[in-house]
Image: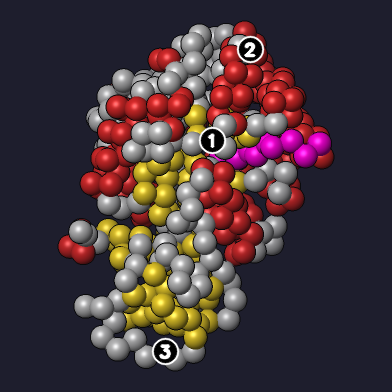
């Protein structure tokens, strides 16, 4: 078999064209191409985007393989239209050494569904006290460029400054989980009217906003790159707007769940809605959508956080925070941003592929399909709707907040370096290397 001829795909939402893939690259784009012996994919009515890139994924391996493995999370990613994911460092052991990041990187390569780019921890053991060996991780086979203590905030200002200074030498980036820990002691949900009614300890917006403001100032002072994880409040959007006006090197992500769900859901006491940062108010959701449309928030990232059943099917207070997100991210973006006209397909490509690839330093990803470009692409049916069933999602975990919801946008195929990882909406085990 030599290559793939994708017939009649709408490139980034434009007029349908044929796309010929050979030797891992886009060979030709045009009308009525002759693919010779290439396998044909009928893409009538499908939108082609560069493969999606997630800068914030929890793959749980090593340590919590009962919740997710690099292989199962990679499969979920491919099914969700992704060709690359950045794996967060809060594993067990923590990814704070060259050894662990190389392990995650090579597990990703062995699984072969998406490129798995490990994120290194900023501090040893995520303890927030001592810088991890950032240089050793950067020069390892995993070539780490993004560092994060996600799950924890690098709250010590001096340490945050040092980390920003350190990574500047190799154009690295510090991805901050912005949460002043002193302001969120015991917090269970967003601090506001609903938390007051339910009598649950609140996580105030200012705990996020104060850290983003401080870190933006530090990034500006040092001249280094800051990325803000899972922005969740209207105030954070305004702080980012200010940071960008100053031309500081600050980027930010929003998660699908913060674009759709609100803190009212905590009233169900169903821990599937427990996440950190917490679901906020409808006004915050509105501001996040606007911030994403305007580019004040740069990218969508999933914060895919699978958890074992016993960590979610328990009382709210004991449950771990986090939601699965890889297989539903695109649909939530279609639901919240595309259908309203806030984003077109080019805008989706910018926020879910090009920009995340640039932030993470993944040069083979986030490239618009064009002759000579590496064939990392995804094919989406924008009209199709599907009903989320937790039991049918890839991997051992079930904690999706979208179970039972019917959502628009289905991923029909994903190609990684010219070979399908997903075809007809299904993983291509047989075709795998
Ligand atoms: O909800 C969350 N879950 N937020 C985080 O910051 C960490 C993540 C996890 O690792 O489960
Ligand atoms: Zn986080």
* Marked residue nearer the N-terminal end (2 or 3): 3
Was residue 168 drawn as part of the magenta stretch in this picture? no
The Cα atoms of the two marked residues, 1 and 2, are separated by 20 Å
Q: Tag 1's secondary structure?
A: loop
Query: In this picture, which residue range is highlighted in magenta?
Result: 246-255
One can see residue 74 in this view? yes
- Name the residue carrying label 1: 170
One can see residue 282 in this view? no
Query: Which residue is pictured at 63% across the width and 34% down the height?
Result: 225
The Cα atoms of the two marked residues, 2 and 3, are separated by 59 Å
* Circles 2 and 3 in contact, beta carbons < 8 Å: no
Q: Which mark is residue 396?
A: none
- Up-down relation of residue 296 to residue 79 (above or below): above
- Residue 210 location in percent, x, y? 72, 20
The Cα atoms of the two marked residues, 1 and 3, are separated by 43 Å
**Around disc 1, counting alpha carbons within 10 Å, would you say few (fewer than 14), some (14 to 19), or many (20 or more)?**
few
Q: Tag 3's secondary structure?
A: loop
* Marked residue nearer the N-terminal end (1 or 3): 3
**Around disc 2, counting alpha carbons within 10 Å, would you say few (fewer than 14), some (14 to 19), or many (20 or more)?**
few
- Name the residue carrying label 3: 33
- Residue 74 location in percent, x, y? 33, 46
Q: Is residue 180 left or right of residue 401?
A: right
- Name the residue carrying label 2: 158
Q: Tag 2's secondary structure?
A: helix
């Amino acid at each position: 078999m030599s290559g793939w001829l994708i017939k009649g795909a709408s490139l980034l939402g434009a007029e349908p064209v044929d796309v010929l893939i050979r030797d891992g690259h886009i060979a030709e784009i045009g009308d009525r191409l002759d693919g010779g012996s290439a396998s044909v994919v009928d893409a009538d009515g499908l939108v082609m985007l560069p493969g999606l890139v997630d800068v914030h994924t929890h793959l749980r391996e090593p340590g919590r393989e009962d919740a997710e493995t690099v292989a199962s999370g990679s499969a979920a990613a491919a099914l969700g239209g992704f060709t690359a994911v950045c794996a967060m460092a809060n594993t067990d052991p923590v990814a704070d050494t060259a050894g662990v990041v190389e392990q995650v990187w090579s597990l990703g390569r062995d699984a072969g569904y998406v490129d798995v780019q490990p994120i290194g921890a900023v501090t040893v053991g995520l303890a927030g006290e001592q810088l991890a060996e950032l240089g050793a991780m950067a020069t390892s086979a995993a070539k780490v460029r993004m560092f994060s203590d996600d799950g924890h905030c690098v709250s010590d200002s001096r340490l945050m400054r040092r980390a920003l200074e350190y990574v500047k030498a190799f154009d690295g980036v510090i991805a901050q989980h912005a949460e002043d820990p002193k302001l969120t002691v015991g917090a269970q949900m967003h601090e506001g009217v609903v938390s007051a009614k339910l009598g649950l300890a609140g996580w105030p917006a200012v705990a996020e906003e104060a850290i983003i403001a401080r870190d933006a100032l530090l990034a500006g002072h040092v001249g280094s790159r800051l990325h803000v994880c899972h922005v969740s409040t209207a105030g954070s959007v305004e702080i980012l707007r200010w940071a960008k006006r100053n031309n500081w090197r600050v980027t930010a992500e929003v998660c699908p769940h913060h674009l759709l769900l609100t803190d009212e859901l905590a009233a169900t006491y169903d821990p599937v809605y427990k996440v950190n940062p917490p679901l906020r108010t409808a006004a915050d959701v509105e501001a996040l959508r606007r911030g994403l449309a305007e580019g004040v928030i740069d990218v969508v990232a999933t914060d895919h956080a699978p958890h074992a059943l016993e960590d979610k099917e328990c009382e709210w207070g004991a449950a771990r925070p986090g939601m699965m997100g890889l297989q539903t991210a695109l649909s939530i973006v279609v639901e919240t941003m595309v259908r309203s006209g806030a984003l077109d397909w080019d805008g989706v490509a910018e926020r879910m592929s090009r920009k995340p690839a640039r932030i993470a330093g993944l040069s083979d990803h986030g490239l618009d399909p064009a002759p000579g470009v590496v064939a990392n692409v995804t094919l989406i049916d924008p009209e199709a709707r599907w009903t989320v069933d937790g039991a049918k999602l890839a991997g051992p975990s079930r904690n999706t907040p979208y179970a039972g919801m019917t959502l628009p946008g289905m991923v029909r195929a994903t190609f990684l370096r010219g070979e399908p990882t997903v075809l007809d909406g299904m993983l291509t085990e047989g075709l795998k290397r």
